[in-house]
């Protein structure tokens, strides 16, 4: 059974590890960065993130796990980030820890803050930041860190949050991308996104791209970056370095 105590025990036993999902340029297929993904391998097998991440929301372990991710990214990718200053790494952050000082402390302690301009912090829509969090978003440019709104569907709620919070990047939800099929080449949300890109300076990353058709439609709409099994599956830090080198 997956409950909070089981997650605590697994974390204490060192059962968590990171994989990295490459982000590629839709223009030329180059790897431009990656998203750090938390994985949990129990003695009985792998546990899907959807089974344990929701249990952690608004708990003390949520912050501890985030700081562990920062430490691990620093350990595994600092040399790569230093060698490739144009590359980035994305880290998912619970909104409830924004503005409390922990992220800054963890970044300084781990050394990852050295690469602040290569760091993207991702926040999901359902965790709208409070006032301290909004102040942290507003102050992020002082460090050079960028913030991304994750799981964007181009709904009214998404757009309202974008108007309220100074996000630099939006990540289009995989379910929306999955709507792009030959029978429906330009879903309504894609038309709305193309219009948004013409009037803002937002960067866009499309998630869950699985076909060449989807990649081409997104590129035509003005989307520059993407993730998905069409390009690469989540991999280790060593695998990310190899994929980045191969992609040119």
Image (tube, rainbow, N blue to C red):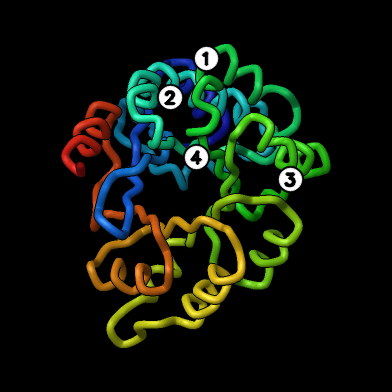
Residues at marks 1 and 4, CA–CA distance in whole angstroms: 25 Å
- Residue 73 circle label: 2
How far apart are the alpha carbons under marks 2 and 4?
Answer: 20 Å
From the image, tell me which residue sits under label 1.
110
Circle number at residue 204: none
Report the residue marked by disc 4.
52
Measure the alpha-carbon separation of dots 3 and 4.
21 Å
In front of the other: label 3 or label 4?
3
Discs 3/1, front: 1
Tell me whether circle 3 and circle 2 mark residues in contact (CB < 8 Å).
no
Q: Find numbered disc 3 in the image and state the secondary structure of the residue it sits on.
A: loop
How far is the residue under mark 3 from the one under mark 1?
24 Å
Residue shown at 63% from the left, 55% from the top: 125
Q: Nearer the viewer, mark 2 or mark 4?
A: 2
* Front position in the image: 227 or 199: 199
Q: Residue at x 68, y 59 (%)?
A: 162
Q: Nearer the viewer, mark 1 or mark 4?
A: 1
2 and 1 marks in contact (CB < 8 Å): yes
For the residue carrying disc 3, how many other residues have a C-alpha within 10 Å: few (<14), some (14-19), or many (20+)? many
């Amino acid at each position: 059974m997956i409950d909070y105590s089981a997650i605590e025990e697994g974390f204490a036993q060192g059962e968590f590890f990171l994989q990295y999902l490459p982000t590629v340029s839709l223009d030329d297929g180059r790897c431009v960065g990656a998203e750090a993904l938390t994985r949990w391998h129990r003695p009985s097998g792998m546990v899907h993130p959807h089974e344990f991440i929701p249990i952690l929301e608004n708990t003390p372990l949520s912050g501890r796990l985030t700081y562990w991710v920062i430490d691990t990214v620093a350990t595994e990718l600092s040399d790569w980030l230093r060698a490739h200053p144009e590359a980035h790494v994305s880290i998912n952050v619970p909104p409830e820890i924004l503005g409390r000082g922990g992220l800054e402390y963890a970044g300084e302690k781990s050394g990852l803050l050295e690469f602040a301009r290569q760091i993207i912090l991702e926040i999901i829509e359902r965790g709208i930041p409070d006032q301290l969090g909004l102040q942290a978003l507003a102050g992020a440019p002082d460090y050079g860190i960028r913030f991304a709104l994750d799981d964007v569907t181009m709904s009214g709620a998404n757009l309202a949050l974008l108007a309220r919070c100074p996000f630099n990047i939006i990540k289009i939800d995989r379910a929306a991308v999955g709507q792009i099929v030959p029978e429906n080449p330009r879903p309504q949300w894609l038309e709305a996104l193309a219009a948004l890109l013409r009037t803002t300076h937002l960067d866009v990353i499309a998630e869950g791209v699985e076909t060449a058709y989807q990649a081409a439609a997104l590129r035509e709409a003005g989307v520059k970056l993407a993730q998905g099994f069409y390009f690469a599956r989540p991999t280790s830090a060593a695998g990310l370095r190899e994929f980045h080198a191969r992609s040119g």
